[in-house]
């Protein structure tokens, strides 16, 4: 019986809600701290986490989020999303969690590779200049899967 060690983590981020973005970032950062390679593939609405104009304006999802423990109708009331986002950001500040832009720099400095999905970039009519400067590039899903083709690599969809 052989033990397989996790060597590489590939995170696929499809939604840029504050809670999903921080989950991916914390896990990628944790992987690097454990000596594990880490990459994040930003696709569909996850691209907002690496768009220069949007990354500091991400919100907590209040509608249809069972973790909010409130009726969906209540989550849709005007101001609820802003309130929940403000509360979450305050709690994160207490824990010295960096804002999204700073966290991206930390990830990059620690060796995390950051990729944008070509299909989603094309679908949303984005240009490379719309995305953060620290981006490693724009990949097709096939190229991304090619990066996973190594023993000890795990994919995680967030």
Image (spheres, rainbow, N blue to C red):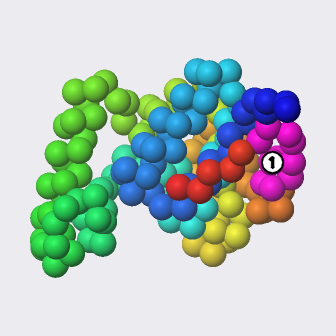
**Position above or below: 87 against 13:** above
31 relative to 65 in the view: left or right: right
For label 1, the SS is loop
Side of 31 where 94 appears, left or right: left
Task: Please tell me which residue is depicted at 68% across the width and 40% down the height of the picture.
Answer: 9
7 horizontally vs 32: left or right? right
- Residue at 86% in and 39% down: 151
Q: Where does the magenta region start and end? A: 144-153
The residue tagged 1 is 148
Which residue is situated farthest in the bottom direction here?
Answer: 73
- Percent across and percent down for residue 16 are 45, 57
Q: Is 8 placed above or below 44 here?
A: above
| Crowd around label 1: few <14 · some 14–19 · many ≥20 (10 Å) | some
**Quick check: can you spot residue 146?**
yes
Can you give x and y, in whole percent of width and height, for residue 23 in the image? 45, 44
Is residue 151 within the magenta segment? Answer: yes
Q: Is residue 77 above or below residue 20?
A: below
Q: Which residue is located at x 54 percent, y 61 percent?
A: 14
Q: How many marks?
A: 1
Q: Foreground residue, 71 or 61? A: 71
Q: Using the rendered view, name the quadrant where residue 82 is placed.
A: bottom left
Measuring from the top left, give residue 147's x and y in whole percent. Answer: 82, 47
Viewer can see residue 130? no
Q: Position of residue 26 (x, y in %)?
A: 48, 35
79 versus 94 height, above or below:
below
């Amino acid at each position: 019986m052989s033990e397989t060690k996790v060597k590489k983590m590939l995170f696929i981020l499809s939604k840029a809600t504050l809670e999903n973005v921080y989950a991916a970032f914390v896990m990628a950062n944790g992987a690097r701290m454990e000596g594990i390679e880490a990459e994040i593939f930003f696709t569909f609405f996850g691209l907002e986490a690496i768009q220069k104009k949007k990354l500091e304006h991400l919100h907590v999802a209040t509608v249809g989020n069972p973790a909010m423990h409130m009726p969906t109708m209540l989550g849709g009331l005007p101001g609820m999303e802003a309130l929940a986002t403000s509360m979450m950001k305050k709690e994160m500040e207490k824990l010295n969690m960096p804002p999204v832009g700073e966290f991206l720099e930390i990830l990059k400095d620690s060796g995390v590779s950051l990729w944008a999905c070509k299909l989603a970039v094309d679908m949303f009519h984005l240009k490379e200049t719309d995305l953060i400067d620290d981006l490693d590039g724009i990949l097709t899903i096939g190229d991304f899967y090619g990066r996973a083709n190594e023993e000890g690599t795990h994919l995680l969809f967030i």
